[in-house]
Structures are given as C-alpha cells and as structure tokens.
Amino acid sequence: MACDPKEAALALHRFGFGPRAGSIEAIAPDPRGALLAELERPNAGLIAAADLPSSGAANRAVFEYNAERAANEKLERRRREAAAQVAMKDSGGEAAMEAKIDAPPPTPAQPAAVPLPRQLFRNEAKAHFDAAINAETGLVERLVWFWSNHFCVNADTTVMAGGYEREAIRPYVLGRFKDMLLAVEGHPAMLLYLNNAQSIGPDSVAGINRDKGLNENLAREILELHTLGVRTVYTQIDVTNFAKVLTGWTILPTVSDPDHGGEFVFLQRAHEPGPQTVLGKTYPDTGVEQGRAVLADLARHPATAQHVATKLARHFVADDPPPALVDRLAQRFLDTDGDLKEVTKALIAAPEAWAPEQKKIKRPGEWIVAALRATGEPGDVVRIIGGQALLGEPLWRPAAPKGFSDDNAAWVDGLGQRLDIANAFAHREGLGIEPEAVVDVALGPLASPETRIAVGRAESRPQALTMLLMAPEFLRR
C-alpha cells in the first residue's frame, strides 16, 4: 500500500541509521515493505571479511606480537645497561668517545607504527561502521548493534571483540535466539570477559588437584541479562548450579598451542561431575552437552521471551514501551521457537512502532552514522571511534555486562558534547555541502518549519549544517 514520504523518513530514522541521498523517495511507496524486504536479503547481516582474521587468529597474533615486543624491550634494557657499565669503567671517557665516532648518523624521526592490537581493532571497527554507513535501510545493521550490545563483551578484556560480533552475532540476527545464545556463550571472547575460562568445578579432577573453584559471573549474567531478566524466576541456587554446569567451558592456552590457542575447548577434567538442577529441571552430566541443554531451555522460557520483547520494544519504540506491544512480541517469540526474523516482522507490523512522535534519542554511534549518511561523507574510522568514545559510548567497551543503556536519560546530558562534535564536523566537511539540500536528504518531510528557517538563516554553511545535526528531529528516531 502506498504511503506518504513522511512515513518513509520515519522508517529510516526509527529502524535504520537515517536516510541517504534518494532513500526517502526510494522507499516512500512502501516503507514497511522495504524494511521487510531487507530481512529477506541473502546473507543479511553478514559482511565480507576476507582481510579480517578470526578471533582465534587475532588472539594468537597479538600474543606473539606482545611476546616479541617484550623480548625486544628486554634486549634494549640489556644493551643500555651494558653501555652504562662501559661508560662507568672508562674514567677518561675514551670508550664513550669511540662509541660516538662509531655510531651511525641519526636518521629522521619516523611516525610510530600503529601497535598490532590497535590496528586490528581499527580494522574491525571500519568493517562495523562501513556496514552501517552503506546499508540500504539499515534495519539489519541496527539489529546487529542491538544484539551485540545485549550480549556485550569488552575490548579492554579481549582483542576478539570485533571478531566476536562477526562470528557470534551477525550470523544469527535473523535466526533462532537459541542458536545465537549458544554461539555467544561458548565464544572465547565471552568466556574471557565473564571469567568462565578460569571457572573450575570444585569436585572435578582439576578442582581437587589445584584447589580451585567456581566463578559464577557467566552463569549469573546469562540468567539476569541474556535470557530470563533480573529478579525473575531463578534463585541463587540456580546460579550456582548453572555455574557448575558451565565448568570446563574454557579456551585453549595460546602459550602452549600456537595453532589453536584462544579457541573454545571443553575440558572434561575441569567440569563439575554429576547431575545439576536448574529452574527445577535436573540435567544429567553429559559433559559439554549439559550446558547446551540448559541454554536451549533458557532460550525457550517465557521469561526470556518477555525480557527480549521488552528490550526490543524499548530500543525501537519507547523507554516505556506499550505493554500490548511487548506481549505480542513475546508471544511471537514463543510461537516461533525464538525466530528473531519473525519477531522483527511482528515489530514492523505493530501500529505502536509507527507512532509519529520521535520518542527515542539516537545513541551516539547511531547519530554519528546518521550524519555521515546524510552528508555522503565516508568518515574516518579513527575520528568515528574517538567521537563515539567522547560521547560516552566507546565502541565495544561497555562499563558493565548489561551493555549501554537504551533509556533516553543516559544520553541527554551528552547532547552538549554532540554540539561540539557537530560543529567540528561541519567546519571540516561542510564548506562544500549545500545545507538546505542535506535537510531534504536527512529529514525530508520530518523537518520542522523551525529547523528549515534556522538552517536557511544561518550565517555560514558550517553553522547551517551544525543546526541540522542538532535539530530535535535529527537527534531522535
């Protein structure tokens, strides 16, 4: 059914990363159909990653890099100490003079090479942002960002954060929740972030021999944050028993395994023996399959459906989403065995999702990408990373396992800093841009008369572009 361009512009802001040149007109005949069509695109959510290493390969490369750097620093210290000893023995300074004569002439200073861990991070970040900047409507990329935040890890803990998103999130954003849950909880980045790689069953062979015990972090966050929701149907006993189930889920040590270090392994001798009861159901000791069985049941639990539905509705619609919408999404989740594509379709079909009021403030990363899409600028990944961090949303570095907040209150105080970034961007990129044309690209019929007047009366192109980027209808979705 045909609809006006205003709904098309709203769709691109609410469900994507804002319009690009021509995109409002392209989807105006059927905005909802355009969103649904993106869900059916082959390989939706995946990105070409021929030049990006797997998580395990990145982990091993950084390990070798750090080991070599430590060795070189040690050799340099030895050289300096030896030179100092020679100088001390040479009371007349003859040896020092010879050293100066024999020393090669100084070379011009060269720019310091980017350390490997930072370069790997930048490469992953570029792939992450390019996918959003170049997306058609941006719906699937928004889902990638949503689920990556829901199942967050921290790049300060592991070099595998970017690879984790590519390997454990992207392939499953339109699949079944159970499959994503299994992928993320067994991924080395998650096992490191939430300390399960060091968790050992107290009564296991390894636990008895090493006097080691449980770490409950992963089990607790799976129940509280990833599936059932905080303070729902589980108890502390469930957390402890689930932690026992997950013992033995660890990673191969890089120092002793140069070919597969940093990859997942189930270590039977660290696994707590015997059956475990979680949420009233007893799971026999089947090794790694015991944990997979618990995760599969958690993925199908009604509390999980309600938790996921609430978070999706809060992210896309409102801080306090309509209860009827949440209930419909939760029911669709249960009816389809957690089919996330079908849940997304139910969200797109919901009348509540198309309310004309833009209630949600774009998170910093969304706002930056929206600015690049609107202006047609490709963006510099170093500047994007820095800007997002300055605005309180450092890429893949949440302050806690619950990820970055989806509530407006978390981002209101940072709007002043957005003005500084918008102004810098506008002065750097805006001299050759026609601001009134960008208003039509970025907002189209969403642009208020006040915004159009302010842009039109601006004293310069950079000032006009700054006003556009800070307009309420551009800041919100």
Image (tube, grey):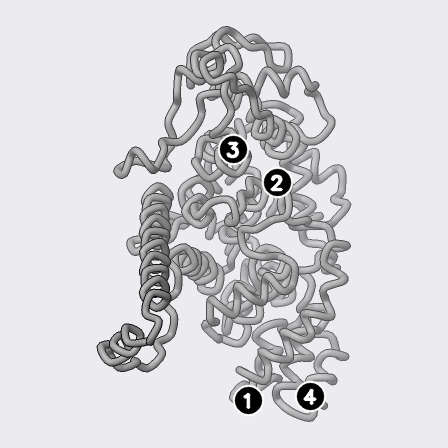
Q: Which residue is mark 4?
A: 456
Q: Quadrant of the N terminus?
A: bottom right
Q: Amino acid at mark 1?
A: Leu
Label 2: which secondary element: loop
Q: Circle 4: is it few (<14), some (14-19), or many (20+) Cα within 10 Å?
A: some
Q: Which residue is mark 1?
A: 431
Q: Nearer the viewer, residue 397 or 226?
A: 397
Q: Amino acid at mark 3?
A: Phe
Q: Nearer the viewer, residue 350 or 408?
A: 408
Tags 2 and 3 in contact by the CB under 8 Å rule? Answer: no
In this rendering, the label closer to the viewer, 1 or 3: 1
Q: Which residue is mark 3?
A: 177
Label 4: which secondary element: helix
Q: Amino acid at mark 4?
A: Gly
Instruction: Relative to 384, say whether 75 is above or below.
Output: above
Q: Earlier in the sequence, mark 1 or mark 2?
A: 2
Residue 64: x and y, percent? Answer: 32, 48
Residue 231: x and y, percent? Answer: 74, 27
Q: CA distance from mark 4 to mark 2?
A: 45 Å
Q: Earlier in the sequence, mark 4 or mark 1?
A: 1
Q: CA distance from mark 4 to mark 1?
A: 15 Å
In this rendering, the label closer to the viewer, 4 or 2: 2
Determine whether, in the image, residue 464 is placed left or right of residue 193.
Answer: right
Q: Which residue is mark 2?
A: 401
Q: Circle 1: is it few (<14), some (14-19), or many (20+) Cα within 10 Å?
A: some
In this rendering, the label closer to the viewer, 1 or 2: 2
